[in-house]
């Protein structure tokens, strides 16, 4: 694929990942392995609240095709097929779930040195259509997204964004929720490997005049351990400790505390991911 402006979903993604990824109050255990035929198998057990679930996923790559199948404890079977370069500079993704036959989707992504376009169509009798377009370069990109309901003839969403990326920083502004919200974020990296960073995000919802300001960061204690923290203007304080117990296997401990309601018990999360 080309080294163009990237997908629209990538606008603001770096800040979003720093402020949300690995922050959890669940207990999760994941084991990954590979078969002799090259199939990647992943088993996951998740305890969320008082509910325990699990799933088994298989991933297989053959030339320009990738097969991804997941079966969970609720007897749902999710399948994703990814085809690269069926046409030049394109990626095609087909996904569906059994027994929810109306969940099928077909997405086509087109990559150019100065533009990226995606189209997603629902595979059912009344399909919805989502279209995104991004123009620019890896340094600066402008993008927009629109969703259309073919049944009602109405737009379900429209979003616009801009991102500016430098070797040591990244900034973005996103106008979303049909123009009802705006979000601006900035990430600054402290080292060349981009393991330590500071992030700030401010969002405003015009219909309620509500503003939310969040600051956070990640710090690499050493090559095996990361510490993350965040605090927003509503008093939500979160922290994450992640340690590579053995190569490629991560132990993640997270916690969240409401500093404006200290009488409430903090929430804790634990995740262990074992890989060969």
Image (spheres, helix red, strand yellow):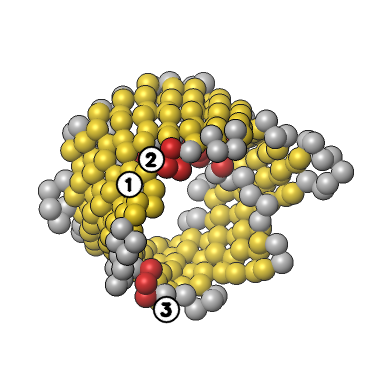
The answer to whether any part of residue 245 appears in the image is: no
Which numbered disc covers residue 42? none
Residue 275 x/y as whole percent: 50, 55
* Total numbered labels placed on residues in the image: 3
Q: Secondary structure at mark 1?
A: strand
Extreme residue toward the left, this view: 88
**Would you say the residues marked 3 and 2 are in contact, meaning their CB atoms lie under 8 Å apart?**
no
Residue at 66 percent across and 32 percent down: it is 232
Which quarter of the figure has residue 47?
bottom right
* Label 2 environment density (alpha carbons within 10 Å; few <14, some 14–19, many ≥20): many
Closer mark to the observer between disc 3 and disc 2? 2
Q: Read off the residue under disc 2.
A: 159
Residue 215 x/y as whole percent: 61, 28
Measure the C-alpha gap from mark 2 to mark 1.
Answer: 6 Å
Residue at 36 percent across and 36 percent down: it is 160
Residue at 16 percent across and 52 percent down: it is 85
Q: Read off the residue under disc 3.
A: 99
**Would you say the residues marked 2 and 1 are in contact, meaning their CB atoms lie under 8 Å apart?**
yes
- Front residue (pair 221, 10): 10
Closer mark to the observer between disc 3 and disc 1? 1
Q: Secondary structure at mark 2?
A: strand
The image quadrant where one finds the N terminus is top left
Which numbered disc covers residue 146? 1
* Label 1 environment density (alpha carbons within 10 Å; few <14, some 14–19, many ≥20): some
**Would you say the residues marked 3 and 1 are in contact, meaning their CB atoms lie under 8 Å apart?**
no
Q: Earlier in the sequence, mark 3 or mark 2?
A: 3
Q: Earlier in the sequence, mark 2 or mark 1?
A: 1
Query: Height in image: 67 above or below 101?
Result: above
């Amino acid at each position: 694929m080309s080294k163009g402006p990237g997908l629209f979903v990538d606008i603001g993604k770096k800040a979003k990942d720093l402020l949300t990824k690995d922050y959890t109050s669940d207990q999760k255990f994941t084991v990954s392995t590979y078969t002799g035929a090259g199939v990647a198998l992943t088993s996951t057990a998740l305890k969320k609240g008082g509910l325990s679930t699990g799933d088994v996923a298989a991933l297989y790559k053959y030339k320009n095709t990738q097969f991804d199948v997941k079966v969970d404890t609720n007897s749902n079977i999710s399948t994703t097929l990814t085809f690269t370069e069926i046409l030049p500079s394109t990626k095609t993704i087909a996904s569906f779930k059994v027994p929810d036959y109306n969940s099928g989707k077909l997405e086509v992504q087109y990559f150019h040195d100065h533009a990226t376009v995606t189209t997603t169509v629902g595979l059912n009798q009344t399909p919805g259509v989502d279209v995104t377009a991004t123009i620019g370069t890896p340094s600066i990109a402008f993008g927009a997204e629109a969703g259309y309901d073919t049944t009602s003839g109405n737009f379900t969403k429209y979003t616009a964004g801009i991102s500016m990326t430098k070797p040591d920083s990244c900034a973005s502004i996103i106008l979303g929720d049909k123009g009802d919200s705006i979000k601006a974020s900035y990430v600054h990296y402290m080292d060349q490997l981009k393991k330590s960073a500071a992030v700030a995000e401010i969002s405003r919802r015009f219909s309620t005049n509500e503003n939310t300001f969040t600051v956070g960061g990640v710090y690499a204690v050493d090559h095996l351990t990361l510490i993350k923290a965040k605090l927003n203007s509503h008093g939500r304080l979160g922290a994450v400790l992640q340690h590579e117990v053995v190569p490629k296997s991560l132990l993640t401990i997270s916690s969240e505390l409401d500093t404006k309601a200290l009488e409430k018990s903090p929430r804790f999360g634990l995740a262990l991911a074992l890989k060969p």
